[in-house]
Image: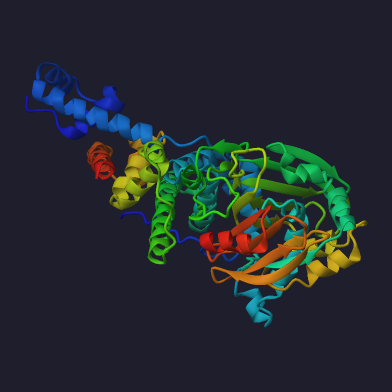
Amino acid sequence: MRASYVIRPGAAPPAAVPPQAAFSSFEEFFRAHYPAVVRIAASVVGDSQAAQDVAQDVFIAALRRFPDPDRCGHAAGWVRAAAAHTGLNAIRAERRRDRRQQLSGVAAAPLSPEETVLDSESRTEVRQALGRLPRRSAAVLVLRHSGLSYAEVAEAMNVKVGHVGTMLRRAESALRKELQR
Amino acid sequence: MSHVSSPVLRRLHDEPRAVPDSAQAHLAGCSRCQARHTTIRQDARMAARLLTAPPVTADPDLAWERLQARLRAPRPGTVAARVGRPRRMTRLSLGTGTLVTAGVVLAGAGAAAALSTVYTPTHVAPVPVSRGDLRALSSISQIGLGQLGGGLPPSGVRQLPFGTLSWTSAGPAETVTSLAQARAQTHLPVTGPASLPSGVGSLPRVMVQPKLTVTIRFSREAGGAVGGSTLVVSAGPGVVAQYGSSSGSSRLTTLVIAAVQRPVATSAGATARQLEAFLLSRPGLPASLAQEIRMLGTTALPVPVPPGMTGRHITVGGSPAVLLTGSAVATGVVWEDSHGVVHGVGGLLNQTDILHVARQIG
């Protein structure tokens, strides 16, 4: 069964803090995987602070799902995938907000030729392109290019290792086409 | 052997040992596969370059404290709704956030504080402060007023009578080439006015201040529930655009436009009510200022009004704003937009010109 990675931004925290023993276990899990989760989120949202906000949402959701992560073999893969998906949610929300601002007449000042060159391959454009890709394509790109091995990507995406190359190839080709549009 | 599949060619780029020798042998002698491999490799390299994560400053200790604070925070609409006072917690939290970062606002940096989990300000409100108030805030925070004006290093620690105050920034403030670059770096909707008042130069000097996190770790000696707790306030990022004069002098700043993301504050170990009561009862804090802070209302973001100036309620772009006037030369206006971004416009201009600029960007 495919794992679900839906995390709603701003969702309410768990009803109660888990018992102390389980909480200690979760703290160890948190400390072990927090840097990787922030790194994955940063490669999506392009900003260290925003990535840390994403990581908070991911671990809040993880605590609800795996209060005792030691007993769950796929918790590490889950938080990595959730970091990618939550980051993608964030940049899609940003796109929607930008669209609303344009509709309401709050358009950005036009860029000068020099600024256009400076921004041509900026993180903003890359994030926008990522946001237009199919969700799983964007996630596989982010996971692989944040340093996960094929086996780790496969675990996080809940697919066979042999399928990662296929997904990655399609996603990279799609990213290039998005950036060339 | 048939041609090597694209997924295998892709994996060859990353994990060549995982690819069978037979595939590699075929590739060595097949120009068609070599051409495909070149394209695949180019796409992979481009993606790797574009998706490399920016430098990340992740502090697991701080992050764990923040997580715990979120877990312990009351859920909106549960406890408060049950007791029939849905806005009580937000009002009580206001003073805490105000006190912790009032100095930053006073210094005109456009920043202010909020407790995001229990308090989300929706509009600005003026708070008159005297020189004595400023000195008291400076004394309590152990940070000089000059430093609050922008001279803080990216990180630092101050010992307080009741604990430790530390701050860290995601990086040093830096000058960027344009407002467009500042927008790209901070995601703040900061724009320059299409039409500038006479006397104002057209090219601003643009500074970006990364997100700043201030942490107060209360010592056990602070007593009660506050003793041993932690308060974390994050503010920013922010953008400041300084315009020189139209005569070409970059030394004279005639107009400043600032935008900063509404701050976030969380507490681990103490409630907002406990923190407010503790901070507003610190020796040296004038009773009148403490009372002003308490009376601000439920969702107001305080804008301190310095001595010699008056703060007046107006609107900018449909949002409540505070117009600061009365100084011989300087005027300013501050407002919070509907996306939680606090904007400020100020300078050596008259009220009409300042409002003209504010209403173009608001």
Residue A105, percent across and down?
Answer: 41, 64
Q: Is residue B231 above or below residue B273?
A: above
Decide if residue A89 is on the left or right side of residue B83: left
Q: Residue at x 15, y 22 (%)?
A: B34
Q: Quick check: can you spot residue A17?
A: no
Q: Which residue extends farthest left?
A: B1
Q: Which is nearer the eye, B151 or B349? A: B349
Residue B218, percent across and down?
Answer: 80, 50
Q: Is residue A39 above or below residue B20?
A: below
Q: Quadrant of the C terminus of chain A?
A: top left
Q: Quadrant of the N terminus of chain A?
A: bottom left
Q: Is residue B255 above or below residue A162?
A: below
Decide if residue A39 is on the left or right side of residue B174: left
Asked which quadrant contains residue B349, the reply is: bottom right
Residue A179, percent across and down?
Answer: 28, 42
Asked which quadrant contains residue B172, the reply is: top right
Q: Which is nearer the eye, B177 or B11? A: B177
Q: How many marks?
A: 0
Q: Residue at x 30, y 27 (%)?
A: B14
Asked which quadrant contains residue B84, the reply is: bottom right
Q: Which is nearer the eye, B99 or A80? A: B99
Q: How is the image coloured?
A: rainbow
Q: Which residue extends farthest bottom?
A: B84
Residue B209, percent across and down?
Answer: 61, 43
Q: Quick check: can you spot residue B298?
A: yes
Decide if residue A113 is on the left or right side of residue B138: left
Decide if residue B116 is on the left or right side of residue A148: right
